[in-house]
Amino acid sequence: MEMMRRREEVPAEQLRFGESEAQVQLRRAWRNVLQALLPQIAISSRRYLESVEPLELEGDLVRLRLDSAFGRQWIAHRLRHEIENLLAQQLGFSVCIELVGEEDTPPTESQTQTEVPLIEPIAAAPPLPPSHFNRGYTFETFIVGRSNRLAYGAAQAVVDAPGKRYNPLFIYSLPGLGKTHLLHAIGQAFLARFPRARVLYLSGEEFLRSYVQAVRHGQADEFRERHRSVHLWLVDDVQFIAGRERTQEEFFHIFNALFATSRPIVLTSDKPPRELLGLEERLRSRFEQGLCADIAPPDFELRVAILLAKAEREGIELPIEVAEFIADKVQSNVRALEGALTRLIAHSSLHREPISLETAAAVLRTFFVDAKAQPVTVQRVLEVVCHEFGVDPQELTGRSRRGDIVPIRQIAMYAARDLTGEPWARIAQVFGRNDHTTILHAYQQISQRLPRDPHLRARIEAIRRRLGCAE
């Protein structure tokens, strides 16, 4: 009677185009099954049930679609009997369920008749260097959560409406959170949709190096035309051009030429445009005129989902409790998370033992020890800060008063004192200073800024993580 009352309280639904009454009945029944099941399922596993699409009801056979092979296996092993019982209560007769994936369902009429705009060829354009996209970095393999949803949606919009939405798209985050994955996904999806398109993907460091080479060999015009003749311009780690006056000048004019002709531009950086030290104001304003989307560190649920997805791609059955254990222990970034799982999979394969919670605990204990084996010294702090900001150690230990170098030097001095506890005089010696007053001043300046500057706190925390000192 309780189930019958619940069914009667559901309002009548409208038929969707091309849908039968049996499909409406199945859709309503599945909705009620979800309401009953989801409270019993761990949050990290609910995405599989929520992704199920009820396809059709044929006699006593209910066909459900779920594209994740691991998800289909998980549901079949753990929930098949309960789902069949709940569906039988909803429909009024016994049923069997069949779980199918994308490869088992024919494309719909709308999918087969989608029109793809033409990309006009560009005559006499210089050849492009090959864009070595990682085949594993696609939209399908990018796991979406609250921390990256905006960046993911905007990246898809670049392919769906090139040059019309979010141009330029500027994606920023700390290292290892998925910026490069999205760039590769955009490039590959764009080429799949526009096979004749000219797509150029490179890093800011490659842009700088190739521009210097072009000027040195008298090929600046060819370099300029190569970049201006693309249909999609993807530049990773654009922060590397900051502080390089001539390179920024060239970048500015290429950017303007592409933007004026509505060519999509996607840039990534380790921080937002306003935080890029040494970036010219005219470039900063252009980077901000489109959409700036950040990617935050993944929360617990997203970390679990990332691990399960990677295990599925590797053809490994990863117990939920193991995924949750790893997600709890590795919180810094996606690369570290996947690295931990890779190590666990390798151990399991080499020793021919199943993945279990006990195995994971033992393997990851070694993983953490290895990660923190390098001692934290003033010199080590200096190296990590230089890597984090993309500067040479000589610039921080020298006497340069450039506006983009001084704040980085102060951060390095602060981190050296905060993370090593070395005497002021010892830190001053490493930084090439005759006395400790400069170090003390830098420490005080950063200490005062930290409480009110979230971006500075994020950079200090990134440095801590690199050194294995995360709080």
Image: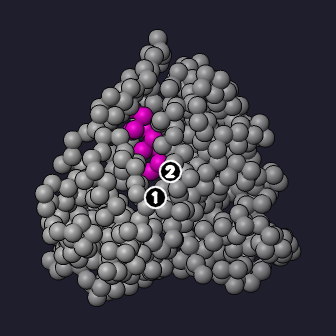
Left/right placement of residue 160 relative to residue 383 reads: left
In the picture as drawn, the residue positioned furthest to the top comes out as 123
In which quadrant of the rendered view does residue 364 lie? bottom left
The x, y position of residue 48, in whole percent, is: 33, 65
The x, y position of residue 397, in whole percent, is: 72, 62
| Front-most of residues 261 and 1 | 1
In which quadrant of the rendered view does residue 458 lie? bottom right
Indicate which disc, 1 or 2, sits on the residue closer to the N terminus. 1
| Front-most of residues 148 and 188 | 148
Residue drawn at x 19%, y 60% is 62
The x, y position of residue 270, in whole percent, is: 61, 55
Residue placed under numbered mark 2 in the picture: 152
| Label at residue 16 | none
Residue placed under numbered mark 1 in the picture: 144
Q: Which region of the structure is painted magenta?
A: 181-191
Quarter of the picture containing the C terminus is: bottom right
Give the distance between the C-alpha atoms of the residues marked 1 and 2, in whole angstroms. Answer: 7 Å
**In what element is the residue under mark 1?**
loop
